[in-house]
Amino acid sequence: MGNYFLRRLLSAIPVLLGITVIVFIIMSMIPGDPATAILGAYATPDNVAKINKDLGLDQPLVSQYFIWLSNMLQGDFGRSYSLNRPVIDEILERFNATLILAGVSFVLCAVLGIIAGVVSAARQFSLADKGITLVVLLGISIPSFFLGMMMILLFAINLRWLPVSGMFAIYGGGDLPDLLRHLVMPAVALASVATGVIARLSRSAMLEVLRQDYIRTARAKGVHERQVIWKHALKAAMVSIIPVLGIQAGFVLSGAVYIEMVFQWPGVGKMLVEAILKRDILLVQGGVVFVAACYVLFNIAVDMLQSWLDPRIKA
């Protein structure tokens, strides 16, 4: 297991380096002068030249990349000009909010998706199977941001059951119940598509396992059907379901960008959009690389869990 973990960790290094190259190239291709965008009305030739020198924008593009990469490997993500604070401090502060939203959404879509898939497979062609399939197709088809806006219109504006936006109430609140009330709509909206995908693939994996000989043998021996489904079949199907969970975790993390904008959730996604509008290059580059690194590490953890359930994977 240790050797397998080391191999997966080493294989992640080229991926992360590739991400840094792609992010850097994309940011360098954005039209306009970053120094002018940062300074705004104070964009005099002297100030622009000073900003370009501070950011290293007066260096060749290749030199800029290696300077940025070298600093980042030492833990220095640079300084945000729009916020006047270290980039890593801003990312870590915002990531707490994103982690809460994405974590709750992922748990929600994983639990609901697996349960829906198992029930649908166990009762194939029944009314429950058809109903779950209909709900799943609707969940996959409706964009998360549109569902979020419809939820705001219904539950926040018309019914006034839930707050419209933010992480906590502006006046008062700040406790766990207040957080949960603000979390309900963005978490459900973010989890909707992933829940449908997990449910569909869980159903397929369960149907394949339920046709195996050892399942028929367990039923012939008189093992209770609930135990056959939830203990024997689900454990075998999890080998196929876990990689799907890893992929959907990345979808949830990336989808947090527009959900945070819809609900004004103060996370990394909202930070990145604001940084792009302000042309805060170092903040954008640092935020994207940090989120990508988290996604890569999570996928390594998923691979480790999958190899634990199925030791043949390590071969």
Image (cartoon, grey):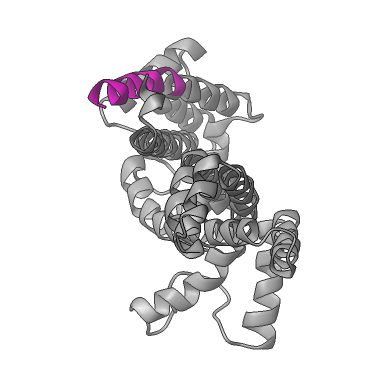
Q: Is residue 236 visible?
A: yes
Residue 307 position, x and y percent, is 37, 32
Residue 233 position, x and y percent, is 49, 50
Q: Is residue 76 above or below residue 8?
A: below
Q: Is residue 18 above or below residue 303?
A: above
Front position in the image: 17 or 194: 194
Magenta span: chief secondary structure: helix
- Residue drawn at x 49%, y 74% is 182
Residue 11 position, x and y percent, is 39, 19
Q: Is residue 153 above or below residue 70?
A: below
Front position in the image: 115 or 108: 115
Task: Judge whether residue 4 is colored magenta.
Answer: yes
Query: In this rendering, would 39 be left or right of 310?
Result: right
Residue range in magenta is 1-15
Q: Is residue 174 visible?
A: no
Choose top left, top right, bottom left or bottom right for residue 9.
Answer: top left
Query: In this rendering, would 64 be left or right of 188?
Result: left
Residue at the far front in the pictured view: 221
| Quadrant where the image shows the C terminus | top left
- Residue drawn at x 54%, y 23% is 22
Front position in the image: 205 or 110: 205
Residue 2 position, x and y percent, is 23, 25
Q: How many marks?
A: 0
| Quadrant where the image shows the N terminus | top left
Task: Judge whether residue 304 is colored magenta.
Answer: no
Front position in the image: 187 or 49: 187
- Residue drawn at x 53%, y 27% is 23
- Residue drawn at x 51%, y 55% is 219
Choose top left, top right, bottom left or bottom right for residue 77.
Answer: top left
Choose top left, top right, bottom left or bottom right for residue 259.
Answer: bottom right
